[in-house]
Image (cartoon, rainbow, N blue to C red):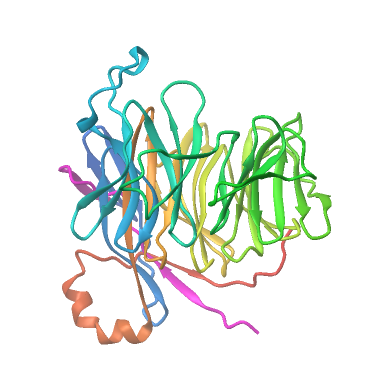
Amino acid sequence: MMKIIKFVAAIAFLLTFTACSMKQEGNRTVIKEPGKSITVIENENTETDQPSIFVEKIDRYEGMEITDWFDEQTVVLAKENPELGKMSLLENAEFYPRSIYLYHLDTKEYETVKAPKDMFLGGAILSPDKKHLLYYEYSIGDTAHYLMSMDEREQSLVTDNILGVALTAEWADANSVIGASYAGGVYIADTNRNITQVADLQEQLFTVQKTQDKIYYITIDDSLQLYMLDMITNEKKNLKVENADGIIPSPDGKQILISQWEGSKKKLLVADAEGNILRTIAEGTEVTGASWSPNQLMIAYQLKTVINGVDSSGLYLYDVLTGKSMQIAVNIESVKIRWSPLGEKIAIAELDERNYNSSIIYLKVNTAETDETNAKDNDKDASETKNIGYIVAINTEKKH
């Protein structure tokens, strides 16, 4: 029998470099800054004899879209590049191009990855082995997806254009990308510039993901139906989930997250690899940014709901062992979420019209022994780290 584990979760969210004021309102701390107020959810009930998650610090990055991690101290991001001058096209003449960089958190230094003139770049995601980069670019009209080698980024002036047919593009494994084609069907492109079509999939597709020997895809039709193709048997399976608009495989490929519309409500579901729905994680008017932690014990997501006619949006963590979610911050919308490789940090990018702002949450896990050993240090650092709540484990068998 799996040992029941209790997690103490603590997250203070979105501290900024700008001046702000804080005040206590019951079990909430309100952080006020120019033009925005952010409420951090707190719970003073704690259990110090159990493993716990603490916040060490939170850094805010204005005007940046953090999309991935190269390592624990280096992020991949896109931001405006004033060095290239403003865009030449009249429609974008007031904006600077957006370039892709590696940003070193410890030294605060930027390292240019890709910086073409007159182009907006973004959505940069590294391959699992960190050797290649998948990103998109556009100036006007549709976006185009590209692959490039990280080793050749400094001397290569021409992007490896092997994904011109791509409507969508997602990493399938360390050496290949999968996506839906503008012409219909599914393509697989590898890092050697080879492109193949998946013969058994010729439909017009909304999105597609691959994990291990299974391809999950959503068809473009009135029902937005979710299917699975077994690449070994070539068998297609209707997963009986309509109005789906997102698929997120777990790191080990044994589960998937599914975002689904049901009328005016949005749901976040977790299913096994065969598409059997295990439970509903969240339900509201909007769910975005769902992301598995590397050890699959946590799922972070943004949820918007309407309570008594009032909109409420926030950032949540779902604990896989407990089957429960905890709200950790409010006033958070339209986010992209990426966990660091060790799960010690979370990067969050918020879209505000055309502009991105990002934050990095630094987490620390303390065991009972660590808590006891560092009791004096914790007392000294009480103003910097908070223990603000806990959730108790429950059984994780299939729920309907």
Q: Is residue 387 visible?
A: yes
- 9 part of magenta stretch: yes
As rendered, which of 190 and 325 lies closer to the eye?
190
Q: Magenta stretch mostly in which secondary structure?
A: loop
As rendered, which of 187 and 12 lies closer to the eye?
187
Q: Bounds of the magenta span?
A: 1-24
Percent of width and height locating residue 194: 60, 47
133 sits to left or right of 31: right
Residue name at image x 24 percent, y 30 percent: 84
Percent of width and height locating residue 257: 62, 53
Vertical arrangement, residue 251 with respect to residue 63, above or below: below
Percent of width and height locating residue 134: 47, 46
User: Residue lying furthest top in this view?
Assistant: 90
Quadrant of residue 201 in the image? top right
Vertical arrangement, residue 199 with respect to residue 51, above or below: above
Quadrant of residue 83 in the image? top left
Q: Quadrant of the C terminus?
A: bottom right
As rendered, which of 170 and 300 lies closer to the eye?
170
Q: Quadrant of the N terminus?
A: bottom right
As rendered, which of 367 and 206 lies closer to the eye?
206
Q: Is residue 39 visible?
A: no
Quadrant of residue 343 in the image? bottom left
Residue name at image x 41 percent, y 24 percent: 139
Residue name at image x 37 percent, y 66 percent: 344
Residue name at image x 37 percent, y 55 percent: 151
